[in-house]
Amino acid sequence: MEITSQDNVTVVRFEAASISDVEAVTAASSQIRSFIDQNHPDELIFDFEGVKFFSSQVLGLLLDIRAKLQPYNGKVVISAINPQLHRVFKITNLDKIFDFFPDKESAVKAISVDKKTFD
């Protein structure tokens, strides 16, 4: 996992094709929570490009991070998710609480436009 900034937008990119190791997800959660505590981002883009599988623990991670951002109206955005994985969001109705974009670039662009609108 890698946390970067692009056009003043924070991007969390998963580098593995399969995210199912409990320890790895727990470590990622800890790293992301620490980043949020230190930086207070408005939005986090979770970029799933190249990810073919993830465990249900990743859904828990996304919900946990969403809850952590809510006190200051932050939100979680998801980009480049595999259609099979997107189905999991639809089945669980989580597709209604996250914004989805076809790729990281369009997610960054949409968030950057939103930020300029509110500045």
Image (spheres, grey):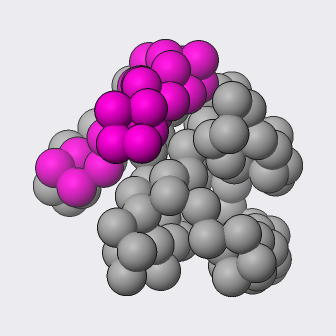
Q: Position of residue 58 (x, y in %)?
A: 54, 64
Quarter of the image holding residue 87? Answer: top left
Give the mark count.
0
Query: Quick check: 15 above or below 12?
Result: above
**In the image, what residue occupies the spot 42% across and 25% down?**
113
- Asked whether residue 59 is drawn in magenta, I would say no
Query: Quick check: 103 above or below 66?
Result: above
Quarter of the image holding residue 63? Answer: bottom left
Question: Is residue 88 in sight in this rendering?
Answer: yes
**In the image, what residue occupies the spot 59% across and 17% down?**
105
- Asked whether residue 118 is drawn in magenta, I would say yes
Query: Quick check: 92 above or below 78?
Result: below
Q: Position of residue 77 (x, y in %)?
A: 43, 45
Q: Position of residue 74 (x, y in %)?
A: 42, 63
Q: Nearer the viewer, residue 92 or 43?
A: 43
Q: Nearer the viewer, residue 106 or 93?
A: 106
Q: Image quadrant for the C terminus?
A: top left
Question: Is residue 107 in sight in this rendering?
Answer: no
Quarter of the image holding residue 84? Answer: top left
Provide the residue span drawn in magenta: 95-119
Relative to 94, is 31 on the left or the right? Answer: right
**In the image, what residue occupies the spot 47% across and 64% down?**
62
Q: Position of residue 49 (x, y in %)?
A: 64, 27
| Dominant SS in magenta | helix
